[in-house]
Image (spheres, rainbow, N blue to C red):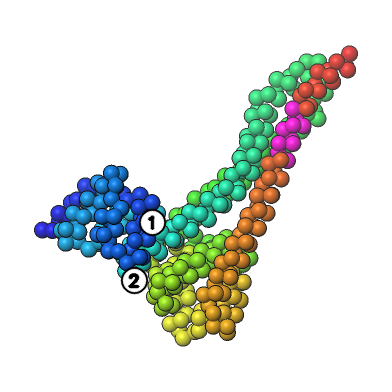
Amino acid sequence: MPWKTAGSLLSRHRKTLIDEEDCHSIRDLLNNGFSFREALDLLETEQNQKVFSIIRRNLENGEEAGSFLSEFLPVQYRSHFACFLRFLNLADSLSLSITVADEDKKEKENLVKQLFYPALLFFAGTIGILIFTKFCFPPLISMMESFRVDPSGSILLARMMEMLSFTLLTLAGCAAVMVLLLKRPGSAMKYYGAFAKRHPHSLPVTITSLDFVRFYHEASRMEPSTRKVLKLLEENVQKPLTSHIACLVEVKLQEGCSFEKAMETEWLDPMLRRFVKTAVYASNLNEMLESYLQLARKRVQQKTKRLTAIVQVCAYGIIGMVLILVYQVLMLPMSMLSQF
């Protein structure tokens, strides 16, 4: 049967994917009125000929493009596309998947870029102190004792540095474990609500609200119905927090609350609630959401800069302590000679 042939082709070539550049080009052509088959014909090259030929065979066997295309998309687009296709057409689903995934990637890259250098300094300094106190300091202490030089001050300083290093590494390890735990299904849902209630203006709440609004704003361009947009957000399993917030808003709307009241949840940034309230009275929700996105991005940058400044101060402090230890080691011969 045709569907069995298509299925066997799909499983046999599951690892053959359309690259990101071709995905963007297909999206652009579909948005400009070309059909999916026409887009494949126009974009075919030696590099993508294999995957395009597999897709054509599936189409010739009677399969709809939406029923199998997600398996040929890059991983970052795949789950979004499969979710959006339940509510939108092929072109809009692909376009929204690419927009959401690319924006996520951009936000993460900016965050990593800002934190990488301070984090590298922090870990290099901390590990440097541990190595120095564990392997370099004991022989020096023994040498001081052999010359009858009191090493108590140096020993105390070394122990303090070692304890500080262990403490900082332990805190960093706990933070890493928490991040890994929050990535597990259901964990973020379990802890985020309580955290957002206690720290409504914190960086995680701002980032989550920014993510929700960005997703809602992009989806509303494809689908003007608020209910359908919220359904899109609810079905997106890749973003559990955004999905849960959309569910909370949808429940309140079903209870008869206005959109303004439905958005009054502790899971969202208080400033976003004020923006929505103003937008309802001004009847320009999309414009207000765009303004919130711009302001929220600036707030995220400012808070990230503060965080990186704190990490940098800790890193420079650790490096300074290493320099003090090295200075003391360099001065040991002078101290020993002064005893004679």
**What secondary structure prevails in the magenta region?**
helix
Q: Is residue 175 above or below residue 271?
A: above
- Closer to us: 68 or 53: 53
Kindly identify the amino acid type of the residue bearing the numbered disc 1. Answer: His
At label 1, counting other C-alpha atoms closer than 10 Å, the crowd grade (few under 14, some 14-19, many 20 or more) is some
Identified at 68% across, 45% down, the residue is 312
Instruction: Find out whether residue 321 is within the magenta segment.
Output: yes
> Measured from the top left, where is residue 172 in percent x and y?
60, 45
- Which region shows up in magenta? 317-326
Sequence-first disc among 1 and 2? 1
Quadrant of residue 147 in the image?
A: top right
State the residue lying farthest toward the left.
1
> Measured from the top left, where is residue 124 in percent x and y?
63, 36
Q: Which mark is residue 108?
A: none
Q: Classify residue 311 as left or right of residue 3.
A: right
Give the residue number, with chain letter if any, for mark 1.
Answer: 24
State the residue lying farthest toward the bottom.
256
How many numbered marks are there? Answer: 2
Q: Which mark is residue 87?
A: 2
Quadrant of residue 323 in the image?
A: top right
- Closer to us: 305 or 54: 54
Instruction: Find out whether residue 284 is within the magenta segment.
Output: no
Identified at 74% across, 36% down, the residue is 320
Give SS at disc 2: loop
Can see residue 258?
yes
Q: Is residue 252 above or below residue 18?
A: below
